[in-house]
Amino acid sequence: MKTLVFLLALFASSTALAQWNNPIDGYCNGEYFIVGSIGLGAGELQINDEQDFAGYASIGVTPAAGIWQVELRYTGFDDGSVNIDQWGIGAKVDFTVTCDIQCLYWMIGWNYGEFDVDNIQRDGFIYEINNDYDDDYWNAGVGYRYKWTQDFDTSIEYMYNDVDTRFYFFDGVDDVRFDLGHLRTLTLNFSYRF
């Protein structure tokens, strides 16, 4: 079901940003390209304050000029206590709108995240949660891209995800309130245009 929703969102977004032109025709005529990206780096979930591996993969659409991009993105993060699977749709836009070899760009998007919470440490206590939660939230970020060839580029991205998932856990005495807080990631990305 998630795959179907993302495909529909991709087609709707690419059509709207392509001034209602048929995106398939635009791709066949070389006006638009498909962009595949992978990113590897570190992330930190606010509640645990521990940095660990974060990675993502995305597929998107960009015009031949490459000044903007609409993408579907999957991000994975696991700090040993909380595991996050995050799916989202977002846009990247160059600050100058005249990007050629290198450029600074901003990003914004909307995500759906699934959180597998094992345990949380707070005030010297370890709470064994062992539960799953989900939420939808916005994200924003900035990046710096360097274009090595017409089709291949690398970039560094900082992303802020406003997770804000709240839940209560009964510790045997009281209901303890938890807020997962935001997820921040810093990744080195490799992208190829098809």
Image (cartoon, grey):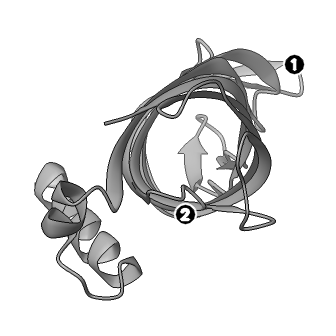
Image point (11%, 57%), residue name: 4
Q: Is residue 59 above or below residue 50?
A: below
Please tell me how crowded label 1 is: few (under 14), some (14-19), or many (20+) other residues with Cα within 10 Å. few
Q: Nearer the viewer, residue 145 or 116?
A: 145
Quadrant the C terminus occupies = top left
Residue 56 visible in the displayed image: no
Residue for badge 1: 124
Residue shown at 56%/53% (left/top)? 167
- Which of the pair 75/91 is nearer the observer? 91
Residue 18 or residue 2, whichever sits in front:
18
**10 horizontally vs 160: left or right:** left
- Examine the rendered structure and indicate whether residue 95 appears above or below residue 175: below
Crowd around label 2: few <14 · some 14–19 · many ≥20 (10 Å): some
- Closer to viewer: mark 1 or mark 2: 2
The N terminus - image quarter? bottom left
Q: Quadrant of residue 50?
A: top right
Q: Quick check: can you spot residue 58?
A: yes
Residue 177 x/y as whole percent: 68, 52
Count how many numbered circles sit on residues in the image: 2
Residue at 61 percent of width and 35 percent of height = 171
Under circle 2, the secondary element is: strand
User: In the displayed structure, would residue 6 be above or below residue 50?
Assistant: below
Distance in Å between CA atoms under marks 1 and 2 = 36 Å
Q: Position of residue 117 (x, y in %)?
A: 50, 29
Residue at position x 89%, y 27% from top? Answer: 123
Callouts 1 and 2 close, C-beta under 8 Å: no
x then y, percent, for residue 140: 69, 59
Identity of the amino acid at label 2? Gly
Residue 175 rendering spot, x and y as whole percentages: 63, 50
For disc 2, the marked residue is: 109
Which tag, 1 or 2, sits closer to the chain's start? Answer: 2
